[in-house]
Image: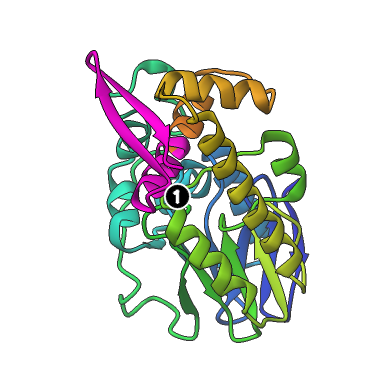
Amino acid sequence: MYELVPLSDRCYAIDCPAKIGVYLTSPTDAYLIDSGNDKDAGRKVRQILEQNHWQLRGILNTHSNADHIGGNRYLQNQTGCKIFSAGIEAAFTQHPILEPSFLYGGYPCKDLRHKFLLAQQSDVSDFRDEAFPKEIEVIPLHGHFFDMVGFRTPEQIVFLADCVSSQATLEKYAVSFIYDVDAYLQTLDAVEKMQAKLFVPSHAEITADIKPLVQYNRSKVFEIADFIRSACAEPIIFEQLLQRLFERYRLTMNFEQYVLIGSTVRSYLSWLKDQGQVDAMFEQNLLRWRRVD
């Protein structure tokens, strides 16, 4: 874990729970792509940089989930580096309480205010800042989170953030976190058509051929959508629907899974409702979902 993997003359990946990219603009100047899940991750990354005599100039954040920005604060305090983000992701990075609050739908209790969902605050600069390495292409990858992006280096290494999950993860958990199902499917279509020397997903193996994994992720989206439609054959309240999903895929309910999968299921319901495949009804002061045949 935290092994430095060469990808090209100027580009590396740090193999860790959420892969971190390293891009060199000179023999001594380095930029990270994401920073890991916490202070300890940041400390390990700093050791790698120091061992290679690289000075950290900036961190390019793909999105604001805590496991991608958790090392920001430590690294920024230690090195004075800039952190680059944009849109809603920048707001979440500057105000990390927004992540657990958004997922829960209100003020999060202590069970949700921990490093898995709540990173430390860090100062952010926009991608348009003059210090951002201009040779790096910013790729919109909407769907998983609000304004998630990927990055393409001049050597045609593409960092894909969380737009695909590994097959092993999907076989174990079935449901990957999605904020906007329609945007996510459009992103999968775009990624499937991409050409690159290597693709670096944050939570899957580095590969030269991303298409099979894209197709597997897409098939899982439609599998979950079909299950939700089936569960709505008779009017059903959200909590019952969530319970059936957990039972179907043998998942274990806790606060983290409740908010992550619960938020995702609500996104599926919104997508299906907008498509006219499910509808909502209010009965005895309960919101019930039902399939439209």
Residue 103 locus on image (x, y percent): 38, 34
Identify the residue at image location x=65%, y=60%: 201
Question: Does 108 sit left or right of 1 as displayed?
Answer: left
Q: Which residue is mark 1?
A: 72
Residue 105 locus on image (x, y percent): 30, 30
Question: Does 205 sit left or right of 131 as displayed?
Answer: right
Q: Image quadrant of residue 148?
A: bottom left
Nearest to the observer: residue 24 or residue 66: 66
Residue 91 locus on image (x, y percent): 27, 51
Helix, strand or loop for disc 1: helix
User: Which residue sits furthest front?
Assistant: 293
Depicted 55 relative to depicted 24: above or below: above
User: Which residue sits furthest top?
Assistant: 284
Question: Does 128 sit left or right of 34 as displayed?
Answer: left
Depicted 219 relative to depicted 235: above or below: below
Residue 116 visible to the viewer? no
Magenta stretch: give its range.
264-293
Q: Amino acid at mark 1?
A: Asn
Nearest to the observer: residue 50 or residue 275: 275
Nearest to the observer: residue 77 or residue 36: 36
Identify the residue at image location x=24%, y=24%: 282
Q: Quadrant of the N terminus?
A: top right
Identify the residue at image location x=47%, y=51%: 75
User: Which residue sits furthest left?
Assistant: 285
Check residue 201 for magenta coloring. Answer: no
Graded by Cα atoms within 10 Å as few (under 14), some (14 to 19) or many (20 or more), the crowding at tag 1 reads many
